[in-house]
Image (cartoon, helix red, strand yellow):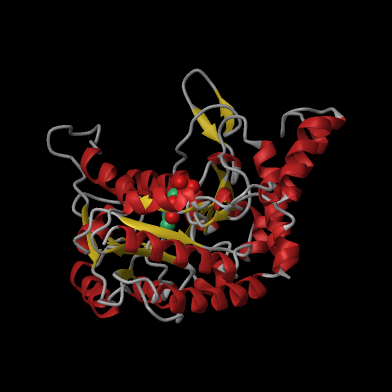
């Protein structure tokens, strides 16, 4: 099955001395030919503005664009198609929610609960909203001053659910933001349980699904989340496109964040009324080709089957966890077992800087990430400034894991 899947990716067809072992999939995945061709076909024969033209070409482009909204709705099992908002990526999706909630829902002193394993995309918008928002009514005193709290992790690299419950009870946060899967530790969080606990405590919940969406079925109704965010480029689709899912009744109340054409109902010299969902959140000319590419990426995932993907990646995770034990001095961050764990392996090797490891691996044709992976708080809590991250997905193989391990053993020997 895997060679057949791999053959669908033009980037792996290049024949060099050292074939590419692409292990940076948590940053961005490679693109199958169907995604590239769908976007190419759109520009060659279907390109037109959406929602505006009355001519056939524009109507065709609009139909293709809106068809992908239906596809995403089915893909995440949303109740209504207008609960699916196209954004530029997970970062923008989270920013829409943070800006809207802090403007219209939250009051000075309200608490926001995040976790120590959140990506900067979840933390930084809240920090900006918490400190910078100044009410126009009373500039001197009305800084919103939202307070951010962070749930700690246990020694295995999982969210400490006991601490989460205590923080919910103590602070009664208005909002909980949690990643479905950690982009550093690979930990899959028990988001369903966390959402239910947060709702009982009166909080709205946003699930950051950037690292889970391509690795198993995500069902927003089964999860019960209020909002969910993900990016196209981490699920075999193009860059520049992402999704914000939100419950209809909440999105209807949330103010828009991007003002201009397309998101309006009526504009007069004195005031503007906004378009209904989903247009209210899609101001300006949307990235139509990228949306078409996202649709092709979903079809690609569905052609394999999300459950088959989860099963194969689970076996690859088990293999990698065993194999990495053969590297002397390697310390794995995150769970050492396959339970609720994605194929993301961040690690350090005693005495060797992460950037040196990544540079030397590159000479062997192995692409990994080195640094803090946009999770500085997590690295600080582990007393690290950097780690190496190998992140795998459906086209990776046990053979590539062996190449990684053997290269790491050689590097480790060199530095001894
Ligand atoms: C967990 C997580 N959340 C959010 C993001 C932000 O995604 P994007 O840069 O595509 O907006 C990333 C990207 O690395 C991520 O790993």
- Closer to us: 313 or 297: 313
List x then y, in percent, for residue 207: 44, 62
List x then y, in percent, for residue 253: 46, 49
- Closer to us: 347 or 187: 347
Identify the residue shown where x is 40% and y is 71%. Answer: 187
Classify 251 as above or below 400.
above
Classify 208 as above or below 158.
above
Describe residue 37's horizontal placement relative to residue 107 as left or right. Answer: right
Describe residue 405's horizontal placement relative to residue 416 as left or right. Answer: right
Identify the residue shown where x is 44% and y is 76%. Answer: 321
List x then y, in percent, for residue 293: 69, 45
- Residue at the farthest top position: 269
Residue 340 visible, this angle? no
Rendering quarter of residue 143: top left
Identify the residue shown where x is 71% and y is 47%. Answer: 35
Identify the residue shown where x is 60% and y is 40%. Answer: 279
Classify 97 as above or below 341.
above
Rendering quarter of residue 327: bottom left
- Report the label total: 0
Which quadrant holds the N terminus?
Answer: bottom right
List x then y, in percent, for residue 155: 25, 76
Which quadrant holds the C terminus?
Answer: bottom left
- Residue at the farthest right position: 56
- Closer to us: 93 or 318: 318
């Amino acid at each position: 099955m895997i060679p057949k899947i791999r053959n669908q990716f033009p980037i792996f067809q290049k024949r060099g001395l050292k074939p590419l072992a692409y292990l940076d999939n948590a940053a961005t995945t490679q693109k199958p030919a169907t995604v590239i061709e769908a976007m190419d076909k759109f520009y060659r024969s279907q390109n037109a503005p959406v929602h505006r033209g009355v001519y056939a070409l524009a109507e065709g482009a609009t139909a293709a664009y809106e068809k992908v909204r239906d596809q995403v709705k089915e893909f995440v099992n949303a109740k209504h198609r207008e609960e699916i908002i196209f954004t530029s990526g997970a970062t923008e999706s989270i920013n829409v929610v943070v800006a809207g909630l802090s403007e219209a829902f939250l009051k000075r002193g309200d608490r926001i609960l995040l976790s120590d394993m959140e990506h900067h995309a979840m933390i930084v918008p809240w920090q900006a909203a918490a400190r910078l928002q100044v009410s126009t009514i009373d500039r001197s005193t009305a800084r919103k001053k939202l307070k951010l709290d962070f749930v700690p992790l246990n020694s295995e690299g999982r969210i400490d659910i006991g601490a989460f419950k205590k923080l919910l009870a103590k602070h009664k946060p208005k909002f909980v933001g949690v990643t479905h899967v950690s982009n550093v530790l690979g930990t899959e969080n028990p988001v369903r349980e966390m959402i239910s606990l947060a709702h009982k405590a009166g909080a709205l919940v946003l699930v950051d699904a950037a690292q889970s969406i391509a690795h198993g079925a995500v069902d927003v109704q089964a999860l019960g989340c209020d909002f969910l965010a993900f990016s196209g480029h981490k699920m075999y689709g193009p860059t520049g496109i992402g999704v914000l899912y939100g419950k209809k009744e909440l999105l209807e109340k949330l103010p828009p964040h991007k003002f201009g054409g397309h998101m309006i109902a009526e504009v007069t010299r004195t005031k503007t009324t906004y378009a209904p969902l989903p247009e209210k959140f899609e101001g300006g000319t949307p990235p139509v080709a990228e949306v078409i590419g996202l649709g092709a990426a979903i079809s690609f995932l569905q052609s394999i089957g999300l459950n088959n993907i989860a099963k194969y990646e689970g076996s690859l995770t088990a293999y990698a966890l065993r194999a990495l034990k053969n590297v002397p001095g390697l310390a794995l961050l995150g769970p050492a077992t396959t339970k609720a764990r994605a194929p993301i392996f961040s690690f350090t090797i005693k005495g060797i800087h992460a950037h040196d490891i990544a540079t030397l691996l590159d000479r062997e044709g192995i692409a990994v990430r080195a640094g803090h992976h946009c999770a500085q708080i997590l690295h600080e809590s582990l007393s690290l400034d950097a780690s190496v991250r190998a992140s795998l997905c459906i086209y990776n193989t046990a053979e590539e894991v062996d190449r990684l391990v053997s290269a790491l053993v050689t590097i480790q020997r060199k530095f001894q």
